[in-house]
């Protein structure tokens, strides 16, 4: 392809009289992703005669909240011949009153030079880079004749092409901008600290080839280097590797390491593993080597899944015994994190008889009970159970009789005390919502969009924290919408399609729950009115729906890495109004309606449930015999996976009455009723699964009189 040549002759005579009074209030949220490849050959002859009389009265009140995410890849070849004759007569009277409130948040990466924070099981993977940008060939890096700079690490110099390195690393690009190469012909040197030569060579191979080998020996060094060089894609690959490494032997170290380098999703997964498998973790060498402060932090976690506080107490005994001479001085402080009210007095007396250290602890800590616990109301008031429950949470919707939107929120725990399963009232949302999006992510519940009491479409959102039983507001979406899809992948919420009150939408946007920023994503390929959506294996699936009276059975898959949609095997039945969920390598679609295939085409019927496995690449019907009868009178609101079951919630017509919750056991493919039934005063609610601490649930039940004993709120 030829390069265009531009010859420009410009004669400009400009007389400008400008009186400007400007009052400006600006709120700017800017998310900019710019990839620019520019080849420019410019010959410019410019004759400029400028007479400028400028009277400027400027009153500027500027409130600027700026969230700027800038990814700039710039390859610029510029040949510029400029002849400039400039005659400038400038009379400037400037009165400027400027009130500027500027809040800027810049991420800072700090090199970490401490000891390794985690131990790993033997494991190695070769991770490919996201194919969004094709990397240069790896052999190109070996061509030293193309190199124009040297990386200096640990006294060793590595030849590099600085333009390619700067395009890959914002950190290198910043160093080049602030310390540009000289024109004396000397070799430009870029000094880096905190990265070893071997790791840097691996990263250079990744930049040029798009692949990197990760293993337990190098993963921490690669994360540290990727963090320093601001290599976001490489950091994401490291996170995926770390997710697969989490085990009892290293979850505490990985948790601390992830927190240090802001690997938020890895930190959440490691914390979740620690809570679930505390009894295994407490027997590891990593646990026994904890500092007193770190041990106390772990023991203070409300969701430790121990069943009995004796296992926490025994973990403390093991930790002190590991180095009793130096640790006995911390005994009282560490024991303050043990919930001694949950310790059985008979168990303690038995331990005191056989274990001298226990006698010493009981003597030192005078709050340990050695008498039988109180009974009745006093016992319930002091009881504080550890652990957590995976709860079905319903929020919003409408009142069944008045059809008015509601802000009510409730939870039910299928796995917590089966003999006393009850719906528990939680804190309501700040406003009523219907046709909204609901999902849980990283331990929180998120509610987005929908419609209010006046049928206005909302762009607002709220976040529920189960630890405090409270709501907080979210930044608004780019577009107000209702009846849309919402899924979550690694702490990123994806909002898809829906309606804005005037038109059907195909737009998609994402929300990072940690940076609290919204980003526009590629549009859906088609309108899917009241379609269903789910995430499976870090990909998003859009299924069914309709447009202009036509229903679809088509299914599309979106890969956030490539930012591309691809079609997959269609559903067996076209449908709209269905619900879907992803579990491991499986997709499930429940309910939805379609028109009959016979002469009574105007009549709608409930569709059969379907199942898709990523390995088989096809849809299979599920047995819906005990779900509901196939008429248009049944309607599903949501599908909530918990453990080995999926709970389908809706108005489910069984032929004799309505059920509102049905449990589908994945292992047997069978349905069964649940207790208690769904509250009959609400319909069209949003629902999700949420992990809530047992001590919080227990306290809420006491406050609401569900134990026939009322305890005042704290």
Image (tube, rainbow, N blue to C red):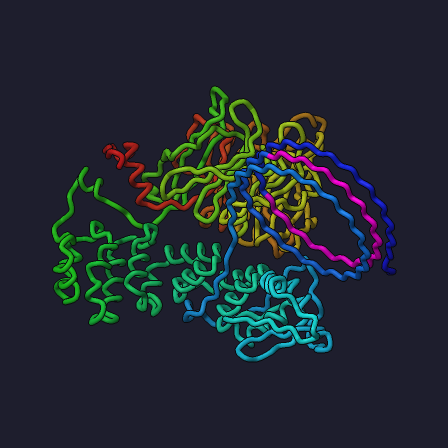
Residue 525 is left or right of residue 41, and the answer is left
Q: Would you say residue 159 sits in the magenta stretch?
A: no
Place residue 495 in its image quadrant: top right
Q: Which residues are magenta?
A: 30-58
Residue 239 is left or right of residue 349, and the answer is right
Q: Please give the name of the residue rendered at 63% of the width and 54% of the height, measured from the top-left corner.
A: 71
Q: Is residue 268 above or below residue 445?
A: below
Place residue 592 in its image quadrant: top right
Q: Which image quarter holds the N terminus?
A: bottom right
Where residue 234 appears, as percent x and y from the top left, is: 58, 63
Q: Please give the name of the residue rendered at 68% of the width and 66% of the height, measured from the top-left corner.
A: 164
Q: Is residue 141 above or below residue 456?
A: below
In terms of depth relative to the viewer, which is nearer, 71 or 685?
A: 71
In terms of depth relative to the viewer, which is nearer, 387 or 43?
A: 43
Secondary structure character of the magenta stretch overall:
strand
Q: Please give the name of the residue rendered at 70% of the width and 48% of the height, measured from the top-left corner.
A: 567
Q: Is residue 118 above or below residue 431?
A: below
Where residue 390 appears, as percent x and y from the top left, is: 41, 46
Place residue 681 in its image quadrant: top left
């Amino acid at each position: 392809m030829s390069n265009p040549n531009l010859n420009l002759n410009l004669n400009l005579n400009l007389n400008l009289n400008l009186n400007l009074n400007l009052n400006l209030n600006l709120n700017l949220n800017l998310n900019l992703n710019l990839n620019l490849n520019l080849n420019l050959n410019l010959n410019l002859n410019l004759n400029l005669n400028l007479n400028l009389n400028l009277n400027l009265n400027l009153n500027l009140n500027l409130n600027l909240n700026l969230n700027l995410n800038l990814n700039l890849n710039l390859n610029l070849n510029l040949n510029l011949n400029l002849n400039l004759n400039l005659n400038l007569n400038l009379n400037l009277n400037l009165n400027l009153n400027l009130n500027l409130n500027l809040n800027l948040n810049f991420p800072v990466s700090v090199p970490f030079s401490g000891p390794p924070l985690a131990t790993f099981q033997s494991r190695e993977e070769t991770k490919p880079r996201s194919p969004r940008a094709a990397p240069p060939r790896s052999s190109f890096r070996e061509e030293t004749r193309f190199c124009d700079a040297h990386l200096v690490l640990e006294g060793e110099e590595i030849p590099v092409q600085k333009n390619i390195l700067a395009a890959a690393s914002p950190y290198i690009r910043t160093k080049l901008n602030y310390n540009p190469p000289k024109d004396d012909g000397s070799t430009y040197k870029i000094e880096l600290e905190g990265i070893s030569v071997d790791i840097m060579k691996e990263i250079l191979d990744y930049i040029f080839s798009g692949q990197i080998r990760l293993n337990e020996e190098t993963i921490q060094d690669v994360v540290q280097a990727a963090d320093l060089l601001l290599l976001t894609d490489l950091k994401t690959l490291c996170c995926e590797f770390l997710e697969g490494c989490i085990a009892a032997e290293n979850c505490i170290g990985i948790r601390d390491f992830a927190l240090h380098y802001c690997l938020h999703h890895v930190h959440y997964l490691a914390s979740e593993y620690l809570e679930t498998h505390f009894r295994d973790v407490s027997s590891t060498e990593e646990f026994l080597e904890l500092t007193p402060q770190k041990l106390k932090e772990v023991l203070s976690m409300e969701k430790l899944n121990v069943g009995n506080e004796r296992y926490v107490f025994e973990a403390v005994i093991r930790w002190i015994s590991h180095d009793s001479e130096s640790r006995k001085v911390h005994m009282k402080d560490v024991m303050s994190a043990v919930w001694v009210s949950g310790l059985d007095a008979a168990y303690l007396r038995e331990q005191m008889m056989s274990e001298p250290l226990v006698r010493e602890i009981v003597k030192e800590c005078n709050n340990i009970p050695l008498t039988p616990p109180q009974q009745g109301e006093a016992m319930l008031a002091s009881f504080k159970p550890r652990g957590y429950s995976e709860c079905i949470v319903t929020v919003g919707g409408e009142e069944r009789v008045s059809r008015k939107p509601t802000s009510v929120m409730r939870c039910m725990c299928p796995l917590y005390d089966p003999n006393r399963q009850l719906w528990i009232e939680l804190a309501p949302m700040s406003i009523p919502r219907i046709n909204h999006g609901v999902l849980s992510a990283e331990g929180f519940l998120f509610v987005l969009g929908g419609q209010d009491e006046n049928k206005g479409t909302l762009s607002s959102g709220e976040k529920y924290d189960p630890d405090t039983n409270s709501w907080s507001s979210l930044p608004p979406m780019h577009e107000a919408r209702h009846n849309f899809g919402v899924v979550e992948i690694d702490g990123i919420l994806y909002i898809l399609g829906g309606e804005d009150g005037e038109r059907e939408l195909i737009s998609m946007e994402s929300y990072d729950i940690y940076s609290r920023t919204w980003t526009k994503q590629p549009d859906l390929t088609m309108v899917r009115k009241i379609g269903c959506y789910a995430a499976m294996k870090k990909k998003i699936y859009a299924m069914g729906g309709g447009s202009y009276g036509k229903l679809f059975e088509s299914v599309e898959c979106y890969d956030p890495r490539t930012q591309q949609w691809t079609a997959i095997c269609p559903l067996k039945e076209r449908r709209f109004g269905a619900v879907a969920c992803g579990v491991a390598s499986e997709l499930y679609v429940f309910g939805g309606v379609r028109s009959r295939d016979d002469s009574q085409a105007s009549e709608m019927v409930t569709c059969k449930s379907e199942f898709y496995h990523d390995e088989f690449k096809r849809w299979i019907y599920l047995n819906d015999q005990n779900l509901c009868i196939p008429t248009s009178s049944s309607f599903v609101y949501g599908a909530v996976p918990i453990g080995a079951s999926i709970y389908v919630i809706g108005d489910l017509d069984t032929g004799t009455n309505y059920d509102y919750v049905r449990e589908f056991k994945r292992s047997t493919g069978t349905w069964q009723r649940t207790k208690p039934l769904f509250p009959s005063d609400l319909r069209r609610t949003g629902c999700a699964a949420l992990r809530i601490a047992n001590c919080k649930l227990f306290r809420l039940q006491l406050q609401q009189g569900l134990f026939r004993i009322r305890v005042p709120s704290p």
